[in-house]
Amino acid sequence: MISNFPWLSRGLAVLRKDLRIEFRTRYAYSALLMFAITTLVTVSFSVGGFLAGPEMTDIAAALLWIILFFSAMAGLSRTFVQEEESGTVIALKMAAEPEPVYVGKYLFNVVLLFSLTVLVVPLFIVMLNLSVVLVGGFLATVFLGAMGLAGASTILAAIVAKAGAKGSLMTVLAFPILLPLLLGAISATRTALGGGSPEAINTDLLMLFFYNGVALAASLLLFEYVWNE
Amino acid sequence: MQNYVAVKKLSKEYSCRQLFVDVSVTIPDRSVFVVLGHNGAGKTTFLRILCGLVPATSGQVDFVHCGNVLTAAEKRAKLGLVSPELELYGELSAVENLEFFSGVRGLPFTLQRAREILEFVGLKGRGHDYVATFSSGMKQRMKYAQALLHNPPILILDEPTANLDEVGVALVDTIIRRQKEKGIVIMATNEPREVCYGDQQLSLA
């Protein structure tokens, strides 16, 4: 069945390879996790006891996505940087078409970010003593937000891997591109935590859904040029 | 002449320094083409342009198979590259590397095929060792395993015997002889015994 979709089957080969290497080295996951845990603990100690009332949901929603955004920036660029630094990029370019490489790296970043989210989001809720009113809407927001972060970060990581100042460039490039996603995700999270109307969260979720579609389509169109540069 | 590589007026310059200018050559099927030149003359760059890894400043390279010029994707399926700059995944075993390169090329993978090719390059019994633990000579053999995995009609070799012992050098001789019977070998070298294989030579000054 999968063999009928060459991009997918070859992309899955890239995903399997990256997961195997990540499982053995934990290059990217360590960076993601350490950043997330450090900021989470700092946030919970500094504001955890003072948050109350309607401002609580506003600040908590923003803090959650700040943690996820900077964690993603800390770890997701490793997928391509690692290939460039270890010299394996030549073998990969000789063997694989650009699109399956993007698909594989995107899926790898999705897996990485989901595994982080599954750990960080419940901890965030417990440590800041939050209650989620619209549970379904909250889960959908986290799902679409993480997918969008992974999608845009993957193409940015491919660009950053070609540049000299890899560390700082990722965040600088990512901020304007991810801003609409972050604003939508923060708004939806605020609604889900504060118990706003389902209609309000649906509008934000729709925006997150379309952001994902646009980010994925644009990345697939542009990736060949970035990859062959 | 159904299968050949046509290099037309190929030039490359880096920061106002010209490596080569207007190189034109036709490399026919069942032949060995050798690129010669001192260090820094542009041998590796020439091969990288042929592989599509580096753009030329001007000129073009056509890979012609059965009378048709290959697209980038078709070219990828018909080229095998061994180069000092090409690295394999050290965190994967030899078999896992071959499994990955089969999968990403859309080829069926069997353990039997992996064992056969590893035995051919002299890595019998080392299939489950991580490539990072290999010596430089073993890594070079592993590069041949990766390059020959898809039976490419065109083999591009940069310093083909780098890091190899006498047995390894004999293996490369065998690979070049076999490849010449079924396709094209393009290699960059200054080793006198490898230069002798060349049906055509290009000397880059």
Image (cartoon, rainbow, N blue to C red):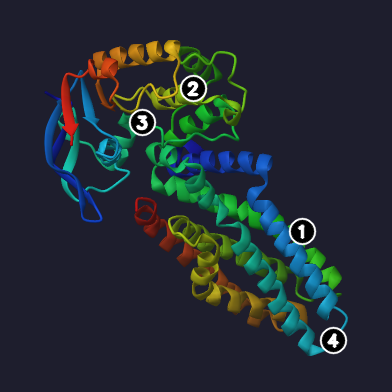
The residue beneath circle 1 is: A119
Which amino acid, by three-letter code, is at mark 4? Ala
Picture residue at 35% right of the left edge, 11% below the top: B174
Q: What element carries label 4?
A: loop
Which amino acid, by three-letter code, is at mark 2? Gly
Dot 3 and dot 2 within a common chain: yes
Picture residue at 20% right of the left edge, 19% below the top: B198
Q: Which of marks 3 and 2 is nearer the N terminus?
A: 3
The residue beneath circle 2 is: B137
Check the picture and name the quadrant holding the N terminus of chain B. top left
Residue count near mark 4 (Cα–Cα under 10 Å), binned few <14, some 14–19, many ≥20: few
Residue A52, label in figure: 4
Q: Where is residue B92 in the image (x, y as percent from the top left)?
A: 59, 32
**Quarter of image, res A31:** bottom right
The residue beneath circle 3 is: B81
Dot 1 and dot 2 within a common chain: no
Q: Which of B203 and A98 is in front in this view?
A: B203
Q: Can residue B152 be seen in this view?
A: yes
Q: Is residue B28 above or below residue B205?
A: above
